[in-house]
Amino acid sequence: MSWWLWTLLALAGLLVVIAIHDLTQTRHAILRNFPVVGHFRYLLERLGPELRQYIVTDNDEERPFSRDQRRWVYSNAKGENSYFGFGTDNRLDAPGYPIFRHAPFPLGDDETGAGVAHREPLSDLASAKVIGERNGRPGAFRPASIINISAMSFGSLSGPAVEALNRGASLAGCLHNTGEGGISSHHRCGGDLVFQIGTGLFGARDADGRFSIDALLESMADTQVKAIEVKLSQGAKPGLGGVLPAPKVTREIAAARGVPVGVTVHSPSRHVDFNDIAGLIDFVERIADATGVPVGVKSAVGDPRFWDELAAEMATKDRGPDFVTVDGGEGGTGAAPLVFSDHVALPFRDAFPVVFDAFARRDLHHDVTFIGAGKLGFVPDAAIAMAMGVDLINVGREAMLAVGCIQAQKCHTGHCPTGVATQSPRLTRGLDPTDKSVRAAGYIRSFRHDLRALCHAMGVLHPSLIRLDQIAIRGADGHLVDAGEALRLDTRWYDDDRRNRLAATLAD
């Protein structure tokens, strides 16, 4: 018989074997009822994200980030033309849609261009506040960039991805939050760090897993740690702990976290070193006294009473966190059960006013630095957040996009195809930190550039000076209303005195 007949018989035999297997197995009803052809259902399910991403959805439909948003990040990261032609394809009449009111006489720009990224000095935006000044920390500093890289630990991200982000932070002059996985060798590539201490105390624990100042100082030695962040919770999975299985605790990860190699590591749902607000403040002050750098807290927002009590205690005792990072419930740099990612913690625009109001009622909002996170890595969202009182923006998944993420949504599987969110050597080898660091910096620089260009068009020098009445938001009834009204903000705290104070510090 000819070779093609043998091939046909072999194929038929294979199909018969598959059919017999499908008919006799009991796990999948579809395969028992539709042997062989039922496999196409599972194939289409597996390829669903890719099909929707590239074929099915419109430019502004896909979640969590649309094709337009990803294209803006990619083009800026690569230094390509980031302009969009032929007008918008967004629904301008959609409820919640923001419109920025430009000034009749905008501020003059230093330059013009055709969407080419990396434009300076227009993109040079420093913070309007000095972190740690209120509490007199020896290491108080003014962040050189209002756009910074959010907490994503080595372990959740690959070593090359962390290195690319750290090098990119150095090139862009911004801060890089370590995440709760400790300080690894990949964090020591020139970028200024915010060292995050999570509930697992990784990088700040003794051999018994208890908090240790000595271990903390040892982790910080010969690093560029500018601040320390005590993480209470994060938007992706507030109220949950975590488990790092033994096979993933490699020698490199164990060294960064201060844990034994090849032993399962548990991260509890809460800190065990304090159980009330007074204890939290004592913990913050203990770390600040030992290190000299500003210390803050990060949390998603649930019970508003916590923030009232924290602000009241800080006002009474004149001590406590130097900065507060508010993570919206839409944050997503950590894998989580569906109910937590979808329904636990307030979205950012609902969460931040809870925190800001609590501090403003005690007149602390002028001195405490507020950091916002949770899908704020695009100019419209960042501008609205800063008009709401945010001082610094942290970007997570958007920074991942800049170093190669394609939104494959396989972060929780260990099979990230671009080597960003995996520890597989076969996959991480494709990510070149030298090339991707330039892209991370390009995204940060371009983000700052476009944000300040928007400010100039609105007649203000800095995003911190944007007024709420300069932003209109489409209501459910189709009418445009000022952002303060649409977001139901207490506008008492957004007066000229606040803006004058911010303007004065910017002029220093």
Image (spheres, rainbow, N blue to C red):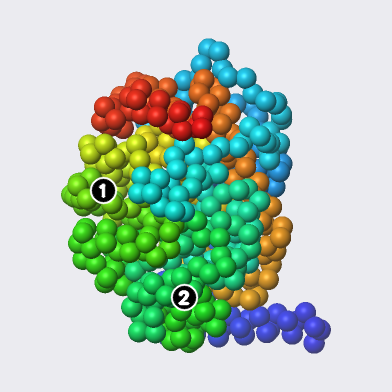
Q: Look at mark 2 in the image and give the residue it sits on.
A: 257
The number of callouts visible is 2
Residue 405 percent across, percent down from the top left: 59, 57
Residues 463 and 33: in front is 463
Residue 29 in view: no
Q: Position of 358 compared to 429: left or right?
A: left
Q: Look at mark 1 in the image and give the residue it sits on.
A: 318
- The kind of residue on which mark 2 rests is Arg
The answer to which of marks 1 and 2 sits earlier in the sequence is 2
Q: Which mark is residue 399?
A: none
- Asked which secondary structure carries label 1, the reply is loop
Callout 1 crowding tier (Cα within 10 Å): few <14, some 14–19, many ≥20: few
Q: Position of 2 compared to 217: left or right?
A: right
Q: Nearer the viewer, mark 1 or mark 2?
A: 1
For this orientation, the residue located farthest to the right is 2
Residue 183 percent across, percent down from the top left: 51, 69
Image point 39% across, 72% down: which residue? 213
Image point 39% across, 56% down: which residue? 295
For this orientation, the residue located farthest to the top is 104
- The kind of residue on which mark 1 rests is Asp
Callout 2 crowding tier (Cα within 10 Å): few <14, some 14–19, many ≥20: many
Residues 321 and 239: in front is 321
Residue 467 in view: yes
